[in-house]
Amino acid sequence: MQKLFLSLLVLITIDAHAQTSAFQWRQIAPGIWKGVIGKPETISPLGVAEIKPLMAALQKLGSPVFPQNLKESKGELNDGKTYLRFPLDKNEQLFGLGLNFKTVQQRGTIKTLHVDHYNGKDDGRTHAPVPFYVSDKGYGVLINSARYVTVYAGTAVRKDSKNPPLEMNRNTDRNWDASPYSDAVEMLVPAAGTEVYVFAGKTALEVVKRYNLYCGGGVLPPKWGLGFTHRTPTLFSDQQILDEVESFEQKGYPLSFVGLEPGWQSHSYPNSFVWDSTRFPHPKQFLDQLLTKNIRTNLWINPYVSSRSPIFKSIQPYTASHTVWVGIVPDFNMKPARDLFKKLFTEQHIQNGVAGYKVDETDGYDSWLWPDVARFPSGYSAEQIRQTYGLQFQKMSADWFREKNTRTYGLTRASNAGSSSLPYVIYNDYYNHKDFITALCNSSFIGVLWTPEARSSKTAEEWLRRMQSVCFSPMAMLNAWADGTKPWTFPEVAEQVKEVMQLRMQLLPYLYTTFAQYRYEGTPPVRAMNLTEGFSFEEKVTGANLHSSENPYAIAVRSDIKDQYMLGDYILVAPFFAGDRIRKVVLPKGKWYDFYTGKLAGEGETIEVSQPNLDRIPLFVKDGGIIPMIPALLHTPKRDEQIPLTVRHYGSLENSWDLYDDDGETFDYEKGIQSWTRLSVRKKPDGTLEGSLPTTQGKMFHYKDIRWEYMGR
């Protein structure tokens, strides 16, 4: 009897420390499955974002079967934590796993996905540590946890592996590898359970589209959000900002919204959230003056409350144990805290005409945010709240504008899974131009938007290169908060900067339709080349020299395409960086044409682009590409303004493309008050091209005097 008792005790002990099981997948939407291990926590990124899947759009994508690769996935509960294991094929490539700035392909990396300011290393500590990876085999895996998830993306080797690497002798075998082949992605979730989602698709792009649609579809910004924005110096007054706006107009530089930095408040770091009466004695009058020029205003804030704020006493019971910049930290998981912010922000800002927010310092560093030992009155841990704080402010503030049937478009420093439909673009204080472009590529895998903002430069060349990249991103922004930089600060490139800013405005119909595709189809507006049809790039591994301290294991370098990307369906962007005079561009299959001249640039090949003098950012358009354009306006069009439209067609392929339009400001498009107009190009019997569109476009079509332009004939 005692022996039986001891046997049972051993079994119970083993079961308590490690419970391994295969996932029981439940299909929850076409091409999407959910599995649960243990007991998931009550706070999660998807829950905070309050996602509303677009089921009709998901159904249009079809119903792929569950990915064969993942059928042997395993989950294990051990020591109060969750261990996950997902199989990998030999040559499988992985993308995603947060907003990375150095690398696009993520197989062979280790990350702890942790909301933080990016500090120069792709280790998982970043502004949007989305625990979602996408495989080139046509599936994606999302871990819906508000914890610091550690990911071993094809790095660890189990002794029971079905595909173990060969054992080699480093002394004699030149092929010895410091990173042996691993056939799995393994994860550690420091919680006693989690939800796991699987997304399937014929291609990696279809997987990303399915993820975005499940999260509510991509954001459709107001038209003014796709113009140009200038953030003014911190302590500017209302008159100084009006003078700044006037200088843009007099010099012919486009401007659609201005950003006010901390000095708009009576007290900042921590914040009062009320207007400074000396610099802004009449806020509504000031905002109205800007609006007469069709220019909106965005306010800088961080959420930390000063003792000088009118809500300081009321919100005290709903704040954390620790402060940030001596400001109390609201717990937005508690409705009274959300209500107090809503009332103050609505009365002080939104009712007066403020169009959006820049939400700063919700990311880290550790020394500038609450520590993980902080306590919050909702009962959620400091870790869980850090992982969701930026996401929560995005959702909360977006709802304030939605209640007024007004779209907003702002900036955030922290985000996570489920944020696709939220009207915020990520930015940071890291300032490496090349890495900014890599981040643009990576943003396309994880349902976030990113801007490579321009702030300052050491040379005129660097300034032009940065401004060119800015104008081909989700938000075209000059951030002059510290030094008052202007687009024309470097006179020797002032005209080239003006030209690319004007081109941004000319492309507004194309950009707006590209974001409508994000909203309705889930297609990211900026796309890494790995998501592009016809793009083929095999990962190459090149050797590295042995170095006793810098590289003691001669770890090889993996190649990556991270300095070019697609903007919408047709435009390939290949930025130059300061000091470059020549660069390579990898063209997908088919013919590609120079955007500016229409000349054939290449066909499914790697080309070299030379720029001996400062000039334009290289842009290429695929054969059959249709690019609708308007004149170079100084401000985005007003709500009912009719604008002449030029439709460019590149190459010789017949094609059609649907141009989207609505009022550009409200959510009435969700009620069907919108238009999709098919732009078509066909060959006539004599072989020449002819463009056409329906003669009746309806009320929500704000274009006139339409003409066609054929490039590359």
Image: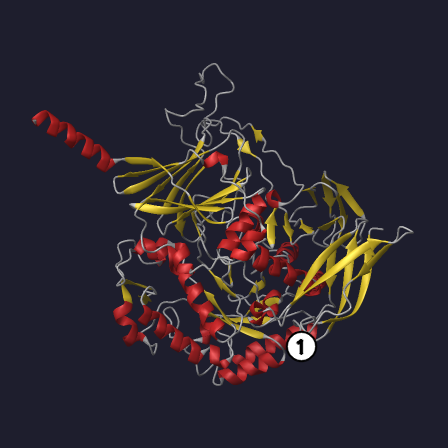
Q: Position of residue 222 (x, y in %)?
A: 58, 68
Q: Position of residue 180 (x, y in %)?
A: 45, 26
The residue closer to the viewer here, 509 or 670, is 670
Q: From the viewer's perspective, is residue 335 above or below residue 415?
A: below
Q: Residues within 10 Å of mark 1 (few under 14, many from 20)?
A: few
Q: From the viewer's perspective, is residue 404 above or below residue 127?
A: below
Q: Is residue 624 left or right of residue 194?
A: right
Q: Is residue 31 left or right of residue 664?
A: left
Q: Quadrant of residue 512?
A: bottom right
Q: Position of residue 582 (x, y in %)?
A: 70, 43
Identify the amino acid type marked 1: Asp
Q: Quadrant of residue 510?
A: bottom right
Looking at the picture, the colour scheme in use is secondary structure
The residue closer to the viewer here, 140 or 638, is 140
Q: Which residue is mark 1?
A: 640
Q: Quadrant of residue 368?
A: bottom left
